[in-house]
Amino acid sequence: MRLKEIVDRSRRIVFFGGAGVSTGSGIPDFRSAGGLYAAEFEGLTPEMILSQSFFYLDPERFFRFYRRYMLHPEAAPNAAHRALYALERADKLRGIVTQNIDGLHKAAGNRRVYELHGSVHENYCMDCNAFYPMEKVLHADGIPRCDRCGGVVKPWVVLYGEAPDKYTVMGACRELSGADTLIVAGTSLSVEPAASMLDYFHGKHLVVINDTPTPADQRATLLIRGDVVEAMGELGLD
């Protein structure tokens, strides 16, 4: 059975995506041979820098790394994002659960998006909770400071050692439990608690699209070993 046939027969699709969805938009993934985690920055690994403890220990170095590697203002939605928007407009897609922080699903027009790890487009003052867009952090000199009170402006992204927003997780699990088809794409399913959320799915079709093996492969109705953008583009919805 092909992906298009499964999509045509489905009424409540949920898409669960990771970094591989956005590589077609020029955003590097994390764990591939040329991914972000293969590099070092000022003698430290990205996992060390992108932790809650390091943010408080050395915020200046954290923001140097964050601005250089985590912000991609030039990135635009690709064919996979646009196909998902078309599915939502057709009222087939009930929700997108994403581990990405780039905000490209919302930029494509989708509204039913659960950003498990937050978004680079949402930043807040740690003292007065004033909201700031990505540009505040991108163009700051050193540590971004609040215009109102001078507090540190922190990205609303989930760092290592932080728990994801419970309401976002609850909403995502609700959508997963009610889906008749789940498309898992561009993720190795190696990050918790996101990976375990697939246990909430009890629908008919599980589609896995990834260029490397995942723990969900054996459960899949359809397994596509390849590029997410190419696979989603075959739906002819872009």
Image: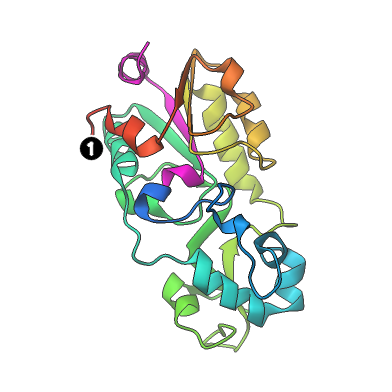
The spot of residue 51 in percent (x, y) is 71, 63
Q: Dot 1: within a 10 Å radius of its alpha carbon, few (fewer than 14), some, or many (20 or more) residues? A: some
- Count of number-bearing discs: 1
**Label 1 sits on what residue type?**
Asp
Question: Up-down: is 47 above or below 24?
Answer: below
Can I make out residue 133 in this image?
no
Identify the image quadrant of residue 59: bottom right
The spot of residue 234 in percent (x, y) is 27, 28
Observer-nearest of 236 and 15: 236
Can I make out residue 37 in this image?
yes
Observer-nearest of 30 and 63: 30
Question: Up-down: is 78 above or below 154?
Answer: above
Q: Is residue 196 left or right of residue 207?
A: right
Q: Secondary structure at mark 1?
A: loop
Quadrant position of the C terminus in the picture: top left
Residue under numbered circle 1: 238
> Going 52% across and 67% down the picture, which residue do you hit?
69
> Going 50% across and 77% down the picture, which residue do you hit?
137
Identify the image quadrant of residue 153: bottom right
Quadrant position of the N terminus in the picture: top left
Observer-nearest of 179 and 56: 56
What is the basis of the colouring in this image?
rainbow
The spot of residue 126 in percent (x, y) is 64, 75
> Going 54% across and 38% down the picture, which residue do you hit?
187
Question: Up-down: is 22 above or below 145?
Answer: above
Can residue 60 be found in the magenta stretch?
no
Can residue 11 be found in the magenta stretch?
yes
State the extent of the magenta-drawn residues as a range: 1-22
> Going 75% across and 57% down the picture, which residue do you hit?
161
